[in-house]
Image (cartoon, grey):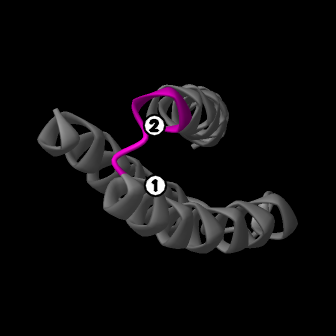
């Protein structure tokens, strides 16, 4: 099961990278920077939660990652729409 959460986290990192690349005009640079910092904290939290093997915390963690992904997808749509 942790493989699924790890894959969710890694694909979110990839999405964050792609949003950063597509923001050529730096329209969303402040928000991207904030999300980058949040992602780093989430990555650290994942390692702690994984070590504890706390499934309840992992579920809440996954929900937060999903929220981040939703926002990143919206940002990507905005950036591609204006391109």
Label of residue 22 in the image = none
SS at badge 1:
helix
Image quarter for residue 64? top right
Circle 2 is placed at which residue position? 58
Image quarter for residue 72? top right
Front in this rendered view, residue 16 or 52: 52
Residue 75 position within the rendered picture, expressed as x and y whole percent measured from the top left: 65, 38
Q: Are marks 2 and 1 in contact (CB under 8 Å)?
A: yes
SS at badge 2:
helix
Q: Residues within 10 Å of mark 2 (few under 14, many from 20)?
A: some
Instruction: Give the residue at the far right of this rendering.
Output: 30
Determine the CA span between mark 2 and mark 1: 6 Å
Dominant SS type (magenta): helix
Q: Is residue 56 above or below residue 80?
A: above
Residue 81 position within the rendered picture, expressed as x and y whole percent measured from the top left: 60, 29
Residue located at (82% from left, 59% from top): 31
Residues rendered magenta in the picture: 53-57
Circle 1 is placed at which residue position? 49
Is residue 15 one of those drawn in magenta?
Answer: no
């Amino acid at each position: 099961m942790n493989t699924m959460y790890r894959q969710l986290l890694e694909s979110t990192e990839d999405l964050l990278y792609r949003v950063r690349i597509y923001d050529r005009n730096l329209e969303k640079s402040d928000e991207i920077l904030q999300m980058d910092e949040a992602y780093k904290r989430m990555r650290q939290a994942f390692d702690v939660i994984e070590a504890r093997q706390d499934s309840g915390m992992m579920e809440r963690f996954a929900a937060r990652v999903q929220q981040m992904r939703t926002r990143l997808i919206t940002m990507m749509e905005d950036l591609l729409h204006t391109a």
